[in-house]
Amino acid sequence: MKKRFTNSLLVAMLVIFSFISQNNFANANQSDDADKFYSLGISYVKASEWKLAIENFKKTSVLDPENPKIYSLLALCYTSTKEYDLAIENFKLAIEKCNMKILTLDPQDYKPFLGDVYEALGLVYYEKKENDLAIESFKKALESKPDNAKLYVQIGDAYAQKTIINHNRADYKKVQKYYEKALSLDPTNSGIQFKVKMIKIIISRL
């Protein structure tokens, strides 16, 4: 399960990084220094030099404090160094700043990004076994990506982990519910098919 999560988190991080790279989210008041530190940070991310990337993104955030992409990139770096509490703190800042942009600018520029940030936040909570917070974050991501089968799988996985930890058999029905919803959205996905099959077998033996 740990290896599968690591792959999922990596994918989420890459989605965020790709989205930021393709969407400028430029701040008209951003200084040349902020742009310089940001560009250096991006270069260090590409080289997996996380500490140096953090150093430059922190400098950028001082000069451009309302830019949500900076905090999401800081969270990406902290996730990569397994400093999960700092990652969560910066994901929350990214969400706060992103919501402000949605209120004042074109929501369609930021809502997909907001969903990706909530998903990544949920994966960090999942890693910390804070399953209720993971589920809450994944459900918030669904508001931006309502037909995303992967999110329903992740909610099911969080309920499954919660059940294993708390020994609450009733939550297995919730696992089944979310796996089956994921399968309805992606009916040819063999991985989801397997999860549905296995949870049905487990429930039949309770």
Image: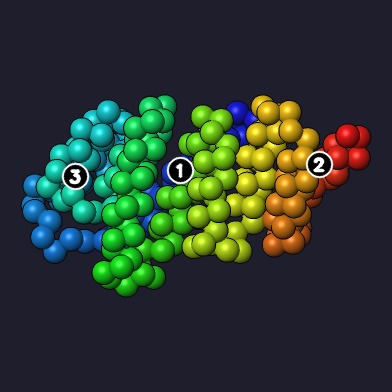
- Asked if residue 179 shows in the view, the reply is no
Please report whichever mark, 2 or 1, sits nearer to the chain's N-terminal start.
1
Q: Dot 2: what SS?
A: helix
Quadrant (top left/top right/bottom left/bottom right) for the N terminus: top right
The x, y position of residue 96, in whole percent, is 32, 52
> Residue at image x 15%, y 39%?
59
What's the CA distance linking mark 2 and mark 1? 26 Å
Q: How crowded is the residue under tag 3: few (<14 C-alpha within 10 Å), some, or many (20+)?
A: some
Left or right, residue 179 beside residue 113: right
The image's colour scheme reads rainbow
The x, y position of residue 30, in whole percent, is 12, 56
- In the rendered structure, find residue 61 and report the number of the disc placed on it: 3
- In the rendered structure, find residue 121 and report the number of the disc placed on it: 1
In this rendered view, identify the residue nearer to me: 37 or 140: 140
Q: Give yes or no for contact between labels 2 and 3 (Cβ–Cβ under 8 Å).
A: no
Task: Give the vertical position of 79 relative to 24 (above or below).
Answer: above
> Residue at image x 72%, y 57%?
181
Q: Residue furthest right?
A: 205
Left or right, residue 12 beside residue 71: right
Q: Residue furthest left?
A: 32
Please report whichever mark, 1 or 3, sits nearer to the chain's N-terminal start.
3
Q: How crowded is the residue under tag 2: few (<14 C-alpha within 10 Å), some, or many (20+)?
A: some
Which picture quadrant has residue 48?
A: top left
The x, y position of residue 154, in whole percent, is 62, 45
Name the residue beneath numbered marker 2: 199
Q: Dot 3: what SS?
A: helix
Task: Give the vertical position of 172 relative to 51 (above or below).
Answer: below
In this rendered view, identify the residue nearer to me: 62 or 194: 62
